[in-house]
Image (spheres, grey):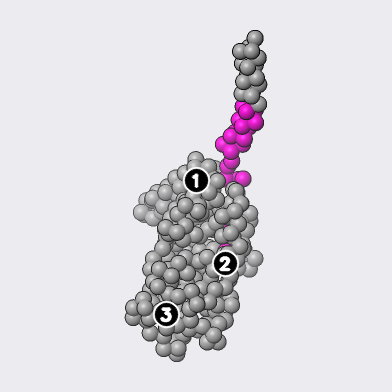
Amino acid sequence: MRSTALAYVIALIFVFVSTTTIPCLASTQTISAKDLTYITEQYPPYSYQENGKLQGISVDLLEKVWEKMNVSLNRSIIQLLPWTEGYNRTLKENSTVLFTTGRFPEREQQFKWAGPIVSGRFVVLAKVDKNVSIKAPEDLNKYKIGAIKDDIAVQMLLDKGVKNQKIVLETTSEPIVEMLKNGSIDAWAYNDITGIWQIKESGENATNYKVAYILGMSDGYLAFNKQSPDYLVQSFQQAIDYIKSKKDSSGVSDYDKILAKYIPTMQVLI
């Protein structure tokens, strides 16, 4: 009798667990690209808003990815936020994607990744008349260097041995450009193309600035919140790989065409 009662209780527990866990698993398995929140920043030429329209290499590529995945989405759903805000939201909120995000060891376990979608050079930019001279990593500590909080350039500076007190952090590039212009900081650690673009947008002559030091190269990715299902991240990866590798009769991929649309307008300082 006791064994029968025990079996009945166990059966009830099994039914309860099954009915509470299976729907949860099913809901996870039905997450699609349409359920994600897409976040980017003002980061030309990769992503930026101009005349009210969001555009850029990464934005164009994402639309191509959606097209390849047969998802009816467009750039109007992408949220444009300051980098630090978007970065922290993607760390904390499920179903969020942040781009363009530099992938390096300190971030590897914080996100799931699809890409690379772009490649960039990170440098220390300075005004020519500031006479900033950096021949070796230890020279970086001679100067006050601006950087955007949580940007990959900050980690690059730290990896080069730069002391925290030598790094001036802001959440957006605008105050850094102003400090660079008025001499409040000596240099700016950032992506070279984006940095020069934003300096020009501020009304400055780009020839008044130079690359004082090259910190290194980094690939940019779509960074998914850690709870994103692997199958969905893999779908994005397959679409990116296809767009980058599939060539037309002239040997040019859709990815090549997107790059050519934006990069030729830039004059990168050597």
Q: Which residue is mark 1?
A: 233
Give the alpha-carbon distance from disc 1 to disc 2, as whole Å: 24 Å
Magenta segment's dominant SS is helix
- C-beta proximity under 8 Å, tags 1 and 2: no
The reply, left or right, for residue 62 in relation to residue 53 is left
Q: Nearer the viewer, residue 103 or 17?
A: 17
SS class of the residue under badge 1?
helix
- C-beta proximity under 8 Å, tags 3 and 1: no
Q: Earlier in the sequence, mark 3 or mark 1?
A: 3
Residue type, mark 2 in image: Gln
Question: Residue 143 at x, y = what percent?
Answer: 45, 82
Q: Earlier in the sequence, mark 1 or mark 2?
A: 2
Q: Nearer the viewer, residue 66 or 141?
A: 141
Residue 42 has which mark?
A: 2
Magenta-colored stretch includes residue 34: yes
The reply, left or right, for residue 6 in relation to residue 264 is right
Give the alpha-carbon distance from disc 2 to disc 3, as whole Å: 28 Å
Residue 191 visible somewhere in the drawing: no
SS class of the residue under badge 3?
helix
Determine the residue positioned at 55% across, 77% down: 176
Determine the residue positioned at 60% across, 66% down: 82
Q: Which residues are magenta?
A: 17-41
Local crowd size for mark 1, using a 10 Å CA cut-off: few (<14), some (14–19), many (≥20): some
Residue 169 visible somewhere in the drawing: yes
Which mark's residue is nearer the viewer, 2 or 3? 3
Residue type, mark 3 in image: Asn
The image shows a total of numbered marks equal to: 3
Magenta-colored stretch includes residue 36: yes
- C-beta proximity under 8 Å, tags 2 and 3: no
